């Protein structure tokens, strides 16, 4: 007698459903025959599956194939309206928000300026989500999940924030619980640089890498790590806080929870670039260097950050002279801290992200890589980030989409 395993047909159907939905997500409109061939299913099984997915609202039929003799085959696509997610990028004085459909397409954006006028943190998040939902032609009730990115560490184990001084106004020790109670959909808070790494890993320069390290340099220095394709947050959510890492020539940071200077930030943060320029006899304003308007995350431009990026952009275009000396000195500073990190992690890849690194561009990347080769026995390849526009927001959407798709694609629920 054959022993039957209860539930196996249902499990197989669920697995087949997910495989088909993943194919439609990755490859776009497909016919029954194409789905059968790509999934390895028979045509009858593929037809039954598509009918089931269409009835459940996960798949829609529309359009026909062309370019061959005879009538075109009916094409199926993932239903973009099956779920919606929202992502937030929270910075002092500005919250950028976007809504994406299940395919990942951004369908609405919103900027909440002067968010503190809305009230506390929960009220600010509600206002930002409602604004983006309206821009997408939806109500906030249609949003399945929200991911909030902010420049602080979230200790989900104890339900508290770390480094809250990075974001004035977001000081509530029970913020995670307040957000969960104040919004009708699941809300996840994540460190902003972690979200940049998620975006680069899914759609950017680190796509296809299981282990990589991302170094962010803009308003501050931060980092994120992927191991085995999973984000590493550390025991308290503080993994990647390398800005205060001890390095030669800078003060030790004795209290990183409240400190604003010292460590790696003082060696290779944006604020050292104008100082380097002056040491090399450069008056970049007199030289006609133009600021990089609108490249920072904050709503209002940071003049010191804009100055640093302008100098690096000018330096990246010069093969010799004082600007080149600035680029070389800055590359050494960056590589000094990075050599310690590479020696501990030995990553497959290092991604340089943030406005400061992108202003220096390929010349800066090449110099940092050359310096790292001399300073560290571990010599990972260095690449510049691919995602240049609102990477934190993109990462928040990607994070929300990954979990939402897992839930939606599980047709056994």
Image: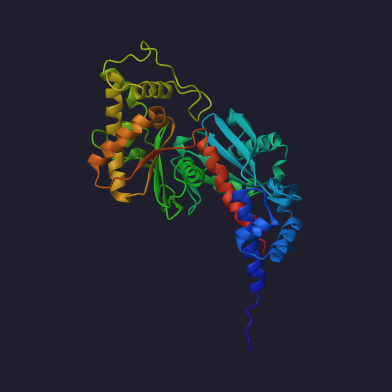
Q: Quadrant of the N terminus?
A: bottom right
Furthest residue in direction bottom, as rendered: 1
Q: Give me the residue at 70% from left, 57% from top.
A: 32
In the image, residue 43 sits, relative to residue 184, either above or below, namely below
Residue 6 is situated, as x and y percent measured from the top left of the image, at 65, 77
Scheme by which the image is coloured: rainbow
Q: Is residue 249 left or right of residue 138?
A: left
Comparing 361 with 281, the one in front is 361
Can the viewer see residue 181? yes
Q: Report which quarter residue 354 is drawn in.
A: top left
Residue 339 is situated, as x and y percent measured from the top left of the image, at 28, 42
Comparing 10 with 215, the one in front is 10
Residue 187 is situated, as x and y percent measured from the top left of the image, at 59, 47
Q: Give me the residue at 60% from left, 58% from top.
A: 38
Q: Is residue 368 left or right of residue 75?
A: left
Q: Report which quarter residue 310 is drawn in.
A: top left
Q: Is residue 331 left or right of residue 393?
A: left
Residue 342 is situated, as x and y percent measured from the top left of the image, at 31, 46
Q: Quadrant of the C terminus?
A: bottom right
Q: Is residue 215 left or right of residue 22?
A: left
In the image, residue 368 sits, relative to residue 5, either above or below, namely above
Comparing 150 with 273, the one in front is 273
């Amino acid at each position: 007698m054959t022993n039957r395993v209860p539930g196996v047909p249902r499990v197989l159907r669920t697995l087949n459903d997910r495989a088909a939905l993943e194919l439609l997500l990755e490859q776009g409109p497909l016919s029954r025959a194409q789905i059968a061939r790509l999934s390895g299913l028979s045509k009858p099984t593929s037809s039954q599956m598509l009918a089931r997915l269409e009835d459940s609202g996960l798949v829609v039929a529309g359009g026909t194939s062309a370019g061959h003799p005879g009538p075109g085959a009916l094409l199926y696509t993932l239903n973009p309206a099956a779920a919606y997610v929202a992502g937030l990028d929270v910075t002092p004085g500005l919250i950028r928000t976007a809504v994406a459909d299940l395919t990942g397409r951004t369908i609405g954006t919103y900027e909440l300026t002067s968010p503190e006028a809305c009230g506390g943190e929960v009220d600010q998040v509600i206002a930002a989500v409602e604004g983006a939902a309206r821009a997408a032609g939806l109500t906030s009730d249609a949003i399945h999940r929200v991911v909030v990115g902010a420049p602080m560490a979230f200790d989900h184990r104890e339900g508290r924030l770390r480094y809250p001084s990075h974001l004035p106004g977001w000081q509530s020790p029970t913020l995670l619980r307040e957000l969960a109670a104040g919004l009708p959909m699941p809300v996840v808070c994540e460190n902003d640089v972690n979200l940049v790494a998620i975006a680069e890993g899914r759609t950017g320069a680190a796509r296809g890498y299981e282990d990589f390290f991302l170094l962010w340099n803009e308003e501050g220095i931060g980092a994120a790590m992927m191991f085995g394709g999973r984000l590493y947050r550390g025991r308290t959510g503080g993994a990647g806080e390398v800005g205060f890492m001890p390095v030669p020539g800078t003060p030790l940071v004795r209290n990183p929870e409240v400190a604003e200077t010292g460590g790696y930030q003082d060696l290779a943060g944006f604020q050292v670039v104008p100082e380097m320029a002056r040491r090399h006899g450069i008056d970049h304003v007199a030289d006609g260097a133009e600021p990089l308007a609108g490249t920072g995350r904050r709503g209002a431009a940071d003049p010191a950050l804009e100055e640093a990026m302008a100098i690096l952009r000018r330096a990246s275009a010069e093969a010799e002279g004082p600007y080149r000396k600035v680029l070389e000195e800055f590359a050494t500073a960056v590589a000094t801290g990075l050599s310690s990190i590479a020696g501990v992690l030995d990553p497959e890849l290092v991604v340089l992200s943030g406005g400061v690194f992108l202003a220096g561009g390929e010349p800066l990347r090449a110099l940092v890589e050359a310096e790292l080769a001399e300073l560290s026995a571990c010599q990972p390849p260095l690449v510049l980030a691919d995602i240049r526009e609102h990477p934190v927001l993109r990462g928040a959407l990607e994070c929300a989409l990954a979990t939402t798709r897992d839930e939606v694609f599980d047709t056994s629920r």
